[in-house]
Image (cartoon, grey):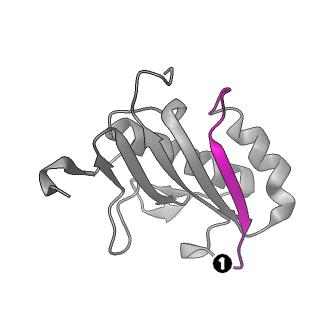
Amino acid sequence: MDHKAKKIVDTTQAPAAIGVYSQAIRVGDTVYMSGQIPLVPKTMQLIEGDFNAQAFQMFDNLQAVAEAAGGALSQIVKMNIYVTDMEQFPALNEIMSRYFNPPYPARAVVGVAQLPKGAMVEAEAIMVIDSYFPE
């Protein structure tokens, strides 16, 4: 792959990477978005509150990365969401419906024992910036 075709996506509107990774990588019209947890970008601390507060912050962070890459949440084609409590599945669906309209992206929700920084939820995504997907 020509490294000139690979673009690092970086924005202060989402949390800085807390490890050896980039917020996202854009290759052509495809953007591979790293996992976002509910850190407040300015403080790099988990947002205070319950699962709902964390889910809203996580989607806000994902949206900031999508926009920094030149896209929008509506252009996400695949998401993987990780939760530490599968009982939160209905709440996650309700909150996600505030950020996405049909056609929804393909998605997996996976229950995990632990997430970075003690987060209750994390999401990663693949976005395709193409005129086919309405913004």
Q: Which residues are magenta?
A: 100-114
User: Along the horizontal axis of the image, is 108 left or right of 11?
Assistant: right
Picture coordinates of residue 46, whole percent (x, y): 55, 63
Residue found at x 42% / y 59%: 43
Picture coordinates of residue 106, whole percent (x, y): 64, 44
Which one is in front, 94 or 102?
102
Q: Is residue 11 visible?
A: no
Picture coordinates of residue 2, whole percent (x, y): 15, 55
Q: For the residue marked with disc 1, what is the amino acid?
A: Gln
User: Which residue is disc 1 drawn over?
Assistant: 114
Residue found at x 73% / y 57%: 51
Badge 1: residue crowd in 10 Å (few <14, some 14–19, many ≥20): some
Picture coordinates of residue 129, whole percent (x, y): 39, 33
* Magenta-colored stretch includes residue 68: no
Secondary element at tag 1: loop
Which one is in front, 22 or 79?
79
Residue found at x 49% / y 64%: 45
User: Along the horizontal axis of the image, is 70 left or right of 51?
Assistant: left
